[in-house]
Image (spheres, rainbow, N blue to C red):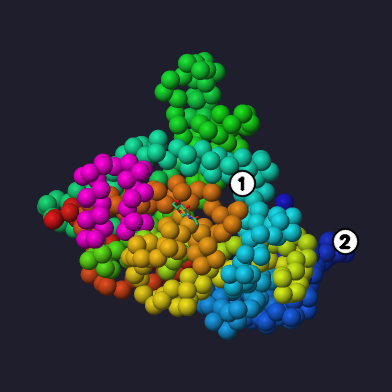
């Protein structure tokens, strides 16, 4: 470990040299950053584009990224613009045509994985084993999605237990119970996976094909995949999947709950839909599939608030040329300003109004409605990304959120604890959108 001496005076010349070199490394990093002149043909928002000063832009982006992206979209819609995010210059695509060109580009030209790894610093946070052989992605896409019906009873069971735990029965019947939805929704942690994996490996070795009540879950699928991975890597892999699933669904679902609690009258149409279906068919994944209002409500909450201000992240590994001839040099990041697109009046009439039946009405009235389920991605709806790298877990996540919303609607009355009708403001940093952590939502057992 290096400890920096308090006074440079105490240093020997050799040490001075060593420290100077250490200080030079960040300075070089600043200077060697992709010169903006290579992107001079693309207009800039959010800060200066001269090399050293561009770091001011990065800092500004951290503080007010959401409004910088909105400004860029409003000014340059129809064209490309660039902004400085925390990592590097990023070129924003604004049209369906550009979005299509980006999503169709081969992985060795515009890479999705590389941006993701850089953002989470994958080598250090996940470990190489997880991302060098990302077999869990195909497990999520195939096995998890195929098993939605089979695991439905288990999931419903978890949901009702979780709600009973977090919304305690009030002392007096009919009393409201206040909760911070963001904290409550992220509470399910994963503990003690290690012993569980050991136990399961033992059972598998002992019972083999005779193992009748073998668990049907992600952990077991990872164990069964034949990779024979070490326990620490397996734990990291499960945590990776959980991180992706829990945070995305908790952020989205918290927004949805706030919309419901600020507009308690929205609960009635949901209740009618769910009550009728449940009475006829009971709870199942197939019944959920018929809950068009529930689905529409969640898609609208995702449209308005989303998870992040951008989507469709890529980094150019080679020079990339758009069909209009614009060249994006290797090393540049690309992204779509998803939040600004989702809030564009030309794409969504009265885009700033939360209209929970926007998509279910579309489905009833127009042909294109069939593409407007919560899991469907498009150039106008990129919460889950779009194209071949769209989130493989979205079928699971949407299914889970629909079950939770339906469960709440038929079991609880919901309102803001202070009876407010205004959506509590979210927190923004960089590209991230974080639902309000202090506003309280009040629940009570359903009265009517
Ligand atoms: C939209 O999602 C529904 C429900 O999963 C699916 O049946 C349909 O094929 C999807 N449409 C598109 C265009 O992806
Ligand atoms: C959260 O919402 C409350 C109103 O319920 C507001 O006073 C507070 O400033 C909001 N928090 C943030 C971080 O915006």
Q: Which callout, 1 or 2, points at the residue further toward the start of the chain?
A: 2
Q: Nearer the viewer, residue 96 or 305?
A: 96
Residue 29 in percent (x, y) is at: 77, 67
Q: How many marks?
A: 2
Q: Which of the two marks, 1 or 2, is nearer to us in this view? A: 1
> What stretch of residues is rendered in magenta?
268-295
| 319 on left or right of 302 | right
The residue at 46%/59% (across/down) is 371
Q: Which mark is residue 126?
A: 1
In the image, residue 442 sits, relative to residue 123, either above or below, namely: below
Residue 286 located within the stretch drawn in magenta: yes
Q: Which mark is residue 386?
A: none
Which residue, as the protein is rendered here, is positioned at the far right?
13
The residue pinned by badge 2 equals 14
Residue 307 in percent (x, y) is at: 48, 62
Say what secondary structure mark 2 lies in.
helix
Say what secondary structure mark 1 lies in.
loop
Dominant SS in magenta: helix
Q: Is residue 287 visible to us here?
A: yes
In the image, residue 116 sits, relative to residue 73, either above or below, namely: above
Q: Nearer the viewer, residue 311 or 179?
A: 311
- Quarter of the picture containing the C terminus is bottom left
The residue at 33%/50% (across/down) is 290
Question: How many C-alpha atoms fall within 10 Å of the one at disc 2: few (<14), some, or many (≥20)?
Answer: few
In the image, residue 110 sits, relative to residue 351, either above or below, namely: above
Residue 296 in percent (x, y) is at: 36, 60
Question: How many C-alpha atoms fall within 10 Å of the one at disc 1: few (<14), some, or many (≥20)?
Answer: some
The residue at 51%/67% (across/down) is 380
Q: Nearer the viewer, residue 233 or 334?
A: 334
Q: Is residue 424 visible to us here?
A: no
Q: CA distance from mark 1 to mark 2?
A: 38 Å
| 305 on left or right of 439 | right
């Amino acid at each position: 470990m290096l400890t920096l001496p308090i006074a440079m005076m105490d240093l020997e010349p050799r040490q001075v040299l060593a420290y100077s070199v250490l200080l030079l490394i960040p300075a070089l990093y600043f200077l060697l950053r992709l010169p903006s002149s290579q992107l001079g043909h693309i207009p800039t928002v959010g800060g200066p584009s001269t090399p050293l000063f561009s770091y001011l832009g990065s800092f500004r982006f951290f503080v007010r990224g959401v409004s910088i992206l909105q400004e860029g979209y409003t000014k340059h819609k129809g064209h490309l613009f660039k902004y400085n995010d925390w990592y590097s210059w990023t070129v924003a695509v604004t049209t369906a045509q550009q979005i299509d060109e980006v999503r169709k580009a081969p992985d060795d030209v515009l890479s999705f994985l590389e941006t993701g790894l850089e953002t989470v610093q994958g080598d250090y946070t996940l470990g190489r084993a997880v991302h060098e052989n990302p077999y869990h992605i195909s497990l999520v896409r195939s096995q998890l999605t195929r098993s939605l019906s089979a695991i439905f009873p288990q999931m419903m069971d978890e949901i009702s237990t979780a709600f009973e735990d977090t919304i305690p029965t009030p002392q007096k019947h009919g009393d409201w119970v206040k909760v911070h939805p963001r904290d409550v929704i992220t509470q399910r942690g994963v503990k003690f996976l290690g012993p569980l994996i050991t136990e399961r490996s033992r059972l598998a070795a002992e019972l083999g094909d005779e193992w009748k009540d073998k668990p049907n879950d992600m952990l077991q699928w990872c164990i069964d995949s034949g990779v024979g991975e070490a326990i620490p890597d397996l734990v990291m892999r499960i945590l990776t999947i959980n991180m992706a699933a829990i945070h995305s669904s908790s952020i989205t679902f918290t927004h949805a709950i706030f919309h419901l609690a600020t507009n308690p009258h929205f609960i009635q149409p949901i209740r009618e839909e769910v009550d009728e279906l449940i009475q006829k068919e009971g709870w199942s994944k197939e019944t959920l599939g018929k809950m068009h209002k529930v689905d529409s409500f969640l898609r609208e909450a995702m449209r308005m608030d989303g998870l992040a201000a951008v989507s469709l992240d890529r980094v150019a590994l080679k020079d990339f040329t758009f069909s209009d001839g614009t060249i994006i040099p290797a090393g540049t990041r690309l992204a779509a300003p998803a939040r600004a697109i989702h809030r564009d009046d030309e794409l969504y009439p009265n885009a700033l109004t939360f209209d929970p039946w926007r998509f279910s009405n579309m489905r009833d009235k127009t042909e294109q409605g069939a593409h407007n389920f919560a899991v469907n991605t498009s150039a106008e709806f990129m919460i889950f990304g779009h194209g071949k790298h769209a989130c493989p877990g979205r079928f699971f996540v949407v299914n889970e959120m629909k079950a939770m919303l339906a469960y709440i609607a038929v079991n609880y009355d919901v309102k803001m604890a202070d009876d407010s009708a205004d959506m509590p403001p979210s927190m923004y940093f960089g590209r991230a959108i974080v639902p309000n952590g202090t506003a309280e939502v009040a629940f009570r057992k359903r009265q009517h």
